[in-house]
Image (cartoon, helix red, strand yellow):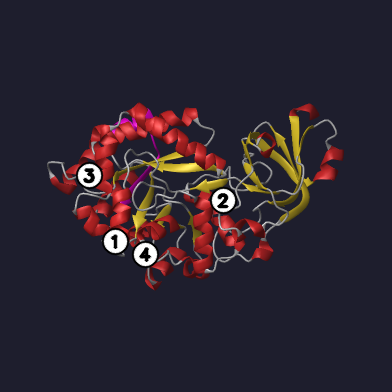
Amino acid sequence: MHSNKEYKLVGPFTQILTMDSIPEKGVIGDDALQLISNGGILILRNTIVEVGIYREMKQTHPNATLEYIEGDHVAMPGLIDAHTHICFAGNRSGDFADRNAGKTYQEIAAGGGGIWSSVKHTRAASQDELVGLMKPRLARLLRNGITTVEIKSGYGLSLTHELKMLRAIQQVKELTEVDIISTCLAAHIVPRDFDGGVTAYLSMVINEMVPVIKEEKLTKRFDIFIEENAYDVNVAKDYLTQLKNLDFQLTVHGDQFSVGGSKVAVELGAVSVDHLEVSGDHEIDLIAKSDIVAVALPGASIGIGCAFTPARKLLDAGACLAIASDWNPGSAPMGDLLTQASILASFEKLSTAEVFAGITYRAAKALKIHSVGKIASGYQADFISFATKDYRDILYHQGMMKVDSVWKAGKIINSYFDT
C-alpha cells in the first residue's frame, strides 16, 4: 500500500496529448488524438498512475504533492529519437560545403571525406574524450524534449575502436538523465585498412567482437548499412542471420541510395529499417505487410539534398512509421528532431497525429521498448510541455516553439520556473 503523500499530481495542463488508444500502424487522423483539457498527471515515483481532469484528481487525491503548472501549457510524451550517431569526434563541414557545391555523397567519400573521415577522428579520440563529446549533445537533446535516444557505434570499424565506442556509450548512460539504447554498427562501411576483405571483417565481428559485447552487456542490437558502397545484400543477409541466431535484435540502414536493404530487413524480421529514401511501391508493400517499423530520417534528406522517405505512401499502405534525426557529423548534422519532423510533415502531408506518433510511441516500437511513448497508466513518467494552449501550434512553428519543461521518470529536469 502507498500513502497519498507518496503521490505527485502535476497540472493543470491546458491540453494533454496522451497518445493512447492510437494504432501502431497506418494512417492516423487528428480526430484520433485523445485530448484531455485542464488535465492532470498523477505520478508514483517514476510511473504514471492516472491521467484525467485536474480538479477531479485533486479532490480524489487530497494528500498528493502538487506540482502546479501556471498558464497555458500543452503536455505530450517525451520525444524518442530512434536513430542517431552522436558518439563521434571531428567535424565534416567540408563535406557539407562540397555537397552544396555539387559533389555527390559517393564522390566525397571517394575523395577521403564521408564516413571514413569520421572514423579517423573517432579512432584518435579516447573513450573518455568520446564521453565528454556526447555529454553536451545529450544535454541539448534533453532540452529539446528527447527523453529516450538510440546511439550507434560505427565510426570505429575495428575490434578495439568499436568496443571503445560501445563502452563510451555505456559509460555516458550514468552521466545523463536521457535513457540510451545502444546499437552496434560495426558494419557501417567496409574498413579501408582491414587486411582480409569483407567476409573476413564480418567474421571478426561475429567471432571476436560479439563475445566481448555479450560478456560486458554492451548492446542487444546490431545494424548494417546495405548499400552499393557499403555491404551488399548477400553478405548482409548472412551476417544478420548469424546475429539473429545469437539472439540479437536487428535493424538495417536500407534503401538510401539503392533498393535491397528493406527486403533483407523484412525477410529476417528486423525491428526497423531506416532511411528508405528510394523505396518504391514494391518495397513499401513489403514493409507495410510486415511488423517492421519504417524509420524516416528527414535530417539526412535535408543534409544531402535528396528526396524524403515516402512517408505518406508508407502510412497509406498500412506501415508503422517512426521519424528520427539521424544526427551525425556528416549527412545529418542538424540533430533537431522536432524541426525535421515538422519539415517532413509539410513535404509528405502528414497529420499532426502521425508526426507525434512517429516521434513518441511508434519510435518506441522501433527500439522495441514498451514503457515509454504515451502518457498513460503504467508508463514511465516521461513527458514534456510547450507554452501554448493549442497542440497544433507545436508543428505550426516548425521547430521554433521550444519545449519549456521536461519531466524524466517523474522528476522535472528543466523548467520555465527556472528561466
Mark 2 sits on what residue?
Answer: 360
Asked if residue 215 lies in the magenta stretch, the reply is yes
Answer with mark 3 or mark 4, whichever residue precedes in sequence. Answer: 3
Q: Residues within 10 Å of mark 4 (few under 14, many from 20)?
A: some
What is the quadrant of the N terminus in the image? top right
Question: Amino acid under label 2?
Answer: Thr
Tell me the magenta residue range: 209-226
Real-space CA distance between mark 1 and mark 4, rounded to the nearest whole angstrom: 14 Å
Question: Amino acid under label 3?
Answer: Leu
Q: Position of residue 42 (x, y in %)?
A: 74, 39
Label 2: element kind: loop
- For this view, does 158 lie left or right of residue 144? left
Answer with mark 2 or mark 1, whichever residue precedes in sequence. Answer: 1
Label 3: element kind: helix
- For this view, does 324 lie left or right of residue 399? left
Mark 1 sits on what residue?
Answer: 101
Mark 1 vs mark 3: in front = 1
Q: Residues within 10 Å of mark 1 (few under 14, many from 20)?
A: few
Question: Amino acid under label 1?
Answer: Ala
Q: Position of residue 372 (x, y in %)?
A: 58, 44
Q: Looking at the image, can residue 232 be seen?
A: no
Real-space CA distance between mark 2 and mark 1, rounded to the nearest whole angstrom: 36 Å
Answer with mark 1 or mark 4, whichever residue precedes in sequence. Answer: 1
Answer with mark 1 or mark 3, whichever residue precedes in sequence. Answer: 1
